[in-house]
Image (tube, coloured by chain):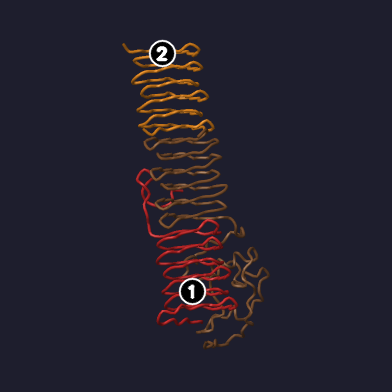
Chain colours: A orange, B brown, C red
Amino acid sequence: MASTVIGAGITIEGEVTSDEDVVVQGTLRGKLIAKDAVSVEQGGSVEADITGGPVSVAGTVTGNITSSDRVDLQNGAKVIGNVKAARITIADGAQFKGNVDMDV
Amino acid sequence: MKDSTVIGRTSVVTGRITGTGDLEIAGRVEGDVAVSGEVVIDSTGMVGANVSATRIVVRGAVRGDLTAEEALVVESGARIVGDLKAPRIAIAQGGLVRGYVRTGGMAAAPRPRAAAAAARTTVPEAKARPAAPPPQPQRAVKAAPPAPPAPVQKAPPPAQKAETNHKPAPRGAAAAGARVGPPPPVVPVLKKGTKAVQKKR
Amino acid sequence: MARTRTGGGGEAVIGRSTRIRGRVSGDGDLRLEGSLEGDVALSGELVIAEGARAISNVEARAVTVGGELEGDIRAQGLVHLEAGARVRGDIHSESVAIDEGAEFDGRLSGPDFELPPELGGGARRRS
């Protein structure tokens, strides 16, 4: 499926919504709502609440993450915000500060 | 490709996009775009704000001004309502544009957006006059130094077939001096009352 | 006023060394290779060849510009600015094609077209 990629040199200030995957390599300030997977790659910076399907973070996120599936924080990730998902993994080396709500 | 951004077909960005790198818009963007790379607005792309980039290719719809540092290409199927500005502009047949277009290669003198635009030339001075600031040598125009305001100029053409006087006035006037126009006419200035004689070939 | 007479398939030509001052009108096509100061009203096609210069408001079925034109164009069909064209004036026609390399300073307007509803539909300028 086609995806939306926010490249490394790009900054988006505002709201991004999508029915497809979203990959963030650059900077996003505002809000991100995706129906499918969200990936914040290394170097990517999101200052926004993220709502999506599976969310994978290897970059920086300052905001709350709400996933309908799973949230994976990779080595190198830095997340400050609350995470709400049915499943979550925090890899060794990932930094995280916030609440986790697995809504069991 | 590194540093390439794609706004997917189902994505909507309500906010500004800035930065470096290329940008492909297949979805919708409702905020200004200012990047230092190439922006391609796909046929499914819709942009509701201004775009400024090094190079812009439009295949979709835009309501906003497009400014490119190098080139702007409007392909067939594109629909644009807004001004286009770039040193090189190409509009393919089938590309729909409504707005001002400037490549900037011409003299910069702003033209009077005279009422005469789309002037039905048939209407003599009367109409053109008001538009042109200097009622004067409308036509002299081109040759930077205003051509001698020949008497003919002013002469309202009293049923004068020999129209040595004519239109594309306002525009011309405004550009006077700013633009190198055709060389001064070789035809000598005619005296008022002169009738034209059509040379039979 | 200069009248062109083409009757029967001939294309009228204003040669390279010819300069005209006056309104030009006629049926049929006209090819300008020289210089013209005066409006043009043709039922056919106007071609302003490379090297030609016109200061004219033009009304024709179709217009091709390879040279210089200062004036507005109103055409029923296609207005085509070739790569070497230098045009200053507004163009109102059914369709327009501007080749890369052409210099143009003016407004384009033509048949109404609509933008997608997401962008507001009508083609009127927003601001």
Marked residue chain, label 2: A
**Left or right of residue C14: residue B150:** right
- Residue B84 image position (x, y, % from top left): 51, 51
Q: Residue at x 42, y 20 (%)?
A: A64
Label 1, secondary structure: give it: strand
Work out which residue is located at the far front of the displayed protein and give it: B1
* Residue pointed to by mark 1: C40
| Residue labelled with disc 2 | A89
Q: Nearer the viewer, mark 2 or mark 1?
A: 2
Q: Position of residue A84 (x, y in %)?
A: 37, 16
| Nearer the observer, A12 or B22 | B22
Q: Is residue B42 left or right of residue B20?
A: left
Query: For the C terminus of chain A, which image quadrant?
Result: top left
Q: Is residue C94 above or below residue B197?
A: above
How many numbered markers are drawn? 2
Q: Nearer the viewer, residue B37 or B13?
A: B37
Q: Position of residue C49 (x, y in %)?
A: 53, 69
Residue at x-position 50% and y-position 25%: A44
Q: Is residue C84 above or below residue C44?
A: above
Q: Chain of mark 1?
A: C
Crowding at dot 2, Cα within 10 Å, few <14 / some 14-19 / many 20+, comes out as few
